[in-house]
Structures are given as structure tokens and as C-alpha cells.
């Protein structure tokens, strides 16, 4: 029993070490967004997240918890654009009207 436990712990430690050594090859990041990447055109930006609630750099691989909020229904009207070299949603009247309708 003691040998099995030692073997299991050794394998876990080895995996942690290997993941640390090769994390750049597997595109593993500590954070979910790359805030240092600047966009140059609108084509550099994409909607991301389970409900499209993020506007992020195309190669960012951002992830979110798959939560649902009623406001997410209105996200389809928001363009994800490169604004001042950052990927951002651009607010518009269609989105604001949708949010007003949800609050009623």
C-alpha cells in the first residue's frame, strides 16, 4: 500500500514538473486574457466566452465560467472592435434598447 501511494505521488509530481517545463508548447497561461496584446484592426478582435460576453484579441484563448445573465441576450448587437489598440465592445442604441426591454 505504501509503495502504491509513493508511486502515485511520484507520478503527480513528475506531471507537475513536466507541465511547468513545457507549458509554452501547450499554450498554457496563468491568466485567461492577454492584456498586453494590442490590436491593430477590427479583424484582430473576436467575441469569446460561453455567451459571447468577452471582446478579446483573436489568439487570446480567453475562457469564462458558463453563467447566464438575461443581459447576455443583447450582446449580439454589440460589435467587438479594435478601439485605441484594445479590443472592446462598441456601445450602440440597439444594445441599450435591448437592455431597457429586459429591465421592464
Image (cartoon, rainbow, N blue to C red):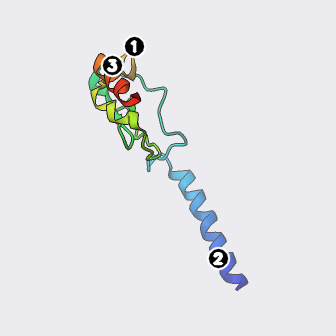
Q: Residues within 10 Å of mark 3 (few under 14, many from 20)?
A: some
Q: Earlier in the sequence, mark 1 or mark 2?
A: 2
Q: Residue at x 33, y 19 (%)?
A: 40
Q: Within 10 Å of the Cα at label 2, are there few (<14), some (14-19), or many (20+) other Cα atoms?
A: few
Q: Answer few, some or many: residues within 10 Å of disc 1's Cα (few below 14, many 20 plus, some between 14 and 19).
A: few
Tell us which disc is closer to us: 3 or 1: 1
Q: Nearer the viewer, mark 2 or mark 3?
A: 3
Tell me the number on the disc at residue 40: 3
Q: Residue furthest top?
A: 84
Quadrant in which residue 81 is drawn:
top left
Which mark is first along the chain, 1 or 3? 3
Element carrying mark 3: loop
In this image, 36 relative to 84: left or right?
Answer: right
The residue drawn where x is 64% and y is 76% is 7
Q: Residue at x 73, y 83 (%)?
A: 2
Q: Nearer the viewer, mark 1 or mark 2?
A: 1
Which residue carries the number 1 mark? 84
Counting from the top left corner in percent of width and height, residue 48 is at 36, 37
Amino acid at each position: 500500500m505504501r509503495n502504491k501511494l509513493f508511486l502515485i505521488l511520484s507520478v503527480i509530481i513528475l506531471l507537475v514538473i513536466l507541465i511547468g517545463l513545457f507549458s509554452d508548447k501547450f499554450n498554457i497561461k496563468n491568466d485567461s486574457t492577454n492584456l498586453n496584446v494590442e490590436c491593430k484592426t477590427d479583424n484582430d478582435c473576436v467575441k469569446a466566452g460561453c455567451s459571447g460576453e468577452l471582446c478579446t484579441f483573436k489568439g487570446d484563448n480567453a475562457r469564462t465560467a458558463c453563467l447566464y445573465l438575461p443581459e447576455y441576450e443583447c450582446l449580439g448587437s454589440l460589435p467587438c472592435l479594435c478601439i485605441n489598440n484594445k479590443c472592446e465592445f462598441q456601445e450602440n442604441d440597439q444594445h441599450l434598447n435591448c437592455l431597457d426591454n429586459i429591465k421592464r
